[in-house]
Amino acid sequence: MYTLIARSAIEKEINIMKYMYFSLIGFYGFFEFYIQHKIKSENRTTVTDITYFLIFIPFFLLFLSPIYCFYVYQYEPNIINFSLFIPLFLAGMAIRFKGYIDLGTNFSDKIELKSHQTLINYGIYRYIRHPLYLASILMTISVICYKCSYLTYIPALLTIIGIALRIYKEENYLLLNFEGYQEYCKNTKRLIPGIF
């Protein structure tokens, strides 16, 4: 009897963690969709770039992998892994939100320059050059901490490789095409304030 009650309590806790995961991912998906469709690209010079897909597709698969594990492998998250997932995921979302606010209409998911675009070097961009990519890395690590399966490692690795390639390509483009970017790079780190 005691075992049955304990198992019932554990199952309830597991279901709460699963629903919280679904809720966070759903909120994040809605947030991304809203932001990306609210900001319009006008009068921009765009570089055709495959790194967008090298980031987006594995990142999307990464967030689906725990759902797959829940229902195919009958994975049961534990409170320790979930406790690592939550703060990293929320920190990533907060950094991403702040980055979008600071960028305003300068935001683009492509490597491009808009006519009359200004260099954003205030807000979170005062401390790091790529807060949106840092946010993606934190969110990627959060799903790895969930530890549902080794399946998460493949899209996580591909996402981080895609981000590294994108940063390299984006910075080279901006150095060649954006006045003042070289000076900005001298004073601001890429991803971690004061370190890297």
Image (cartoon, helix red, strand yellow):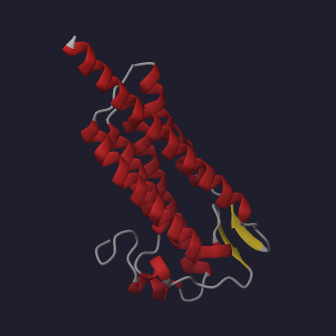
Tell me if I can see residue 113 in this picture.
yes
Tell me if I can see residue 133 in this picture.
no
Using residue 69 as the reference point, say whether residue 106 is left or right of it: right
Instruction: Residue 175: give x, y in percent of width and height.
Output: 54, 79
**Of all residues shown, which one is farthest toward the left?**
2
For image coordinates 29% across by 46% down, the residue present is: 83
Instruction: Residue 52: give x, y in percent of width and height.
Output: 59, 53
Q: Quick one: 180 or 99, which is closer to the camera?
A: 99
Height in image: 17 above or below 84?
Answer: above
Place residue 164 in its image quadrant: bottom left
Using residue 103 as the reference point, say whether residue 190 is left or right of it: left
Picture quarter with the C terminus: bottom left
For image coordinates 45% across by 40% down, the residue present is: 21
Q: How many marks?
A: 0
Using residue 139 as the reference point, say whether residue 37 is left or right of it: right
Q: Quick one: 137 or 10, which is closer to the camera?
A: 10
Q: Quick one: 123 or 117, which is closer to the camera?
A: 123
Place residue 189 in its image quadrant: bottom left
Height in image: 91 above or below 190?
Answer: above
For image coordinates 22% across by 10% down, the residue present is: 1
Height in image: 61 above or below 161?
Answer: above
Instruction: Residue 75: give x, y in percent of width and height.
Output: 36, 24
For image coordinates 39% across by 43% down, the residue present is: 143
Height in image: 23 above or below 123?
Answer: above
